[in-house]
Amino acid sequence: MFDNKKSNNIIKLPFGTRDILPSEIDERNKIKELISREFRMWGYGEVNTPVFEYTRNISVGAGKNWKDKLINFFDVDGNPVSLRSDMTIPIARLAGMRLKENQLPSRFCYFADSFRQSGTQKGARRIYNQAGLELIGFKNSIIADVEVLIILINILNGLNVKDYKIGLGHVEFIEGLCDWFELDIKERDFIRNRVILKDFVELENFLNKRDTKKAKIFIKLLQPESSIDKISNLISDIDNKKVIQSFNYIKELNNILTGLNNKDYFITDFSIVRDFDYYTGLLFEVYCPALNDIIGSGGRYDKLIKKFGKDIPATGFALDIDLAHKAIEVLQGKEELKILLKTGNNADIGDSIKLIEIARKLHKMGVIVELLYEDKPELEVFALEKKYNIIVEVKSNFKDLEVLDIKSNSRKVEKINDFIEGLKRR
Amino acid sequence: MAKEAIKIAIPKGYLFEPCVGVLEKAGYDVSFLLEDNRKLSIYSSRDSIVYIISRPMDVPVYVEHGACDLGFSGKDALMEKESKVYELLDLKNGECRIILATLKNEIENVKKHYSRFGVVKVATSYPNIARKYFDEKGIQAEIIKLHGSVELAPALGIADEILDITSTGRTLEDNNLVEMSEIAVSTTRVIANATSYRVKYDLINNFINKIKSVIK
């Protein structure tokens, strides 16, 4: 059946997509359970939204080149529709459409796939499996941001992600620095693009042409920094409102988080810019050294829900489940008893039905039982791969069982009832 | 190996010597790098640095995917790969120019060919740079990727033009080619992985400052 793959014409998937098999899903489910528990404890309710929506909605806040980033197609009536590229935009749409004043604040969480277009040669993923939350409707933004960050830390620590750092930045900081440099719109665009591309060489060259002294400070301020005081000294000569306000916001956030004993997880980094341009204040990213990658991100988006009808402030984050999975050791859940149950050779349909009856009894006791209705060579290898602890063969008299404990490789014959009693006592 | 070591990608080929030169000037122990062997990964215990010797085009890829924290890369490779890395420093050495060239005495023919057929054939090891350049100019181009000896392409009739790098112009001349236009000037850059840059910031900053002090 599997030998002749050449004759199979449908063996490929579109680039950037993949299948996920049970062993991986099992581990991911453990991760999701842990995250879900944390979400529930803080009162976040899970939501789901359609996988595709009108492009007009999905493209709101998706950034300048949204056409290249979304996966688009046409509905039967000719309307352009797009797969969602994150969950924040659909949830903002949901909030604008359905929430009433007295339902605020609203706490929503989600576990969902999002879809982003990518170039063929880059070979990047096009499906992102994320867990995330949105905290909608608190006027005091800083304390809402603190809650979201604390939950994020609890999850990362609960998953035992090693040595991670959360970078904190602010959308308005760079804007303020551009004001300070008295740059026009075109020049601001240039600066923003250099920061997005992380091209500090060109950035420095450009700024040096204007004012080398100021340029030095500008570049320094865009470097990661764990000491708030150092930044404080650097901006002491900058009399721009945006710079001062956004810095003070991060400083206060830092103070609160330090007070809550979370200082070591944070660095300040005003060079953080995200792909989505709906953010209005705080921005953050989770860096994971084991993967050298960003495994989660988020921030404040106070003007997004307004685009869908209601002026409500909000904040949130998303954690990439694929990356989080790679970043951690396998989670140890409690060891489950898994039995592979089979009949002897030459069993008929009646025997198989009896097998199902035995399995149902065991299922009621919470034991995982997979049935084999046919003979299978190299059964032990098969069982081991699927993490079964015991192979049980029902003898043709349907009273006796041959029990093979795979780990200890011990074999014994037992009466069915004795075996079930033994499991009950376990 | 110390846990706090940083990994640095060094390009083989013409950028190797200038990069090692800068490292040496900045006070790093490069004796291992100059040994005549084929090791591709070298650990300097004195400086807690692992050097990874790689093909120039792979340096941005190694750094982007976190195989290395830092790397020395030509701007040409960065432009071609468009890797998401931090470009921190211009070493201002290893200068070369990215240019378009064609066979001597053929410029008129190439132009005539384009006006008749509306498409130009270009051989290059930089298909991404080429595609972007011609897109911007609004010129239709058929881009043929070659892995080396691009200068031969026009003479062999594979392509009308080539897009390649040149430093002295010698190879162009030897192959009977003339420059048509300059697309960009490339120098060596120090690049960093985005996560390393945040997590190992102190180590990286220290390295950058030492390098900076010897290039200006």
Image (tube, coloured by chain):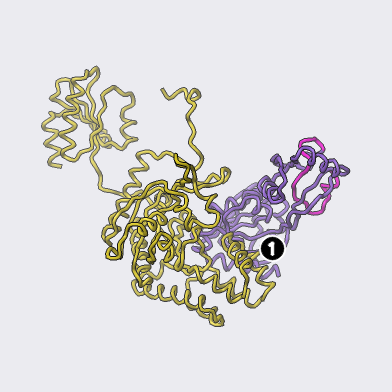
* Residue A92 or residue B192, whichever sits in front: A92
Q: Is residue A367 visible?
A: yes
Residue B214 against residue A275 in the figure, above or below: below
Specify the colour of chain A: yellow
Look at the image and tell me whether residue A167 can be seen: no
- Residue B122: image x %, image y %? 74, 42
Q: Is residue A124 left or right of residue B12?
A: left
The front one of A318 and B35 is A318
Q: How many marks?
A: 1
What colour denotes chain B?
purple
Lateral position of residue A121 relative to residue A17, left or right: right
User: Where is mark 1, residue-wise?
Assistant: B91
Give residue A193's quadrant in the image: bottom right
Looking at the rendered image, the quarter that the N terminus of chain A falls into is top left
Left/right placement of residue A296 relative to residue A159 reads right
| Subunit under mark 1 | B
Is residue B173 rendered magenta in the image? yes
Residue A154, given in percent of the width and then of the height, sits at: 33, 61
Residue at left offset 32%, top offset 57%: A98
Asked which secondary structure carries label 1, the reply is loop
Q: Nearer the viewer, residue A387 or B33?
A: A387
Residue depicted at x 32% and y 47%: A29
Q: Position of residue B11 (x, y in %)?
A: 66, 52
Looking at the picture, how far across and down is residue B143, in whole percent? 70, 41
Q: Quadrant of residue A376?
A: top left
Q: Amino acid at mark 1?
A: Leu
Magenta residues, start to end: B155-175
Q: Is residue A292 magenta?
A: no
Task: Decide: is A162 above or below A229.
Answer: above
The one nearer the camera, A233 or A158, is A233
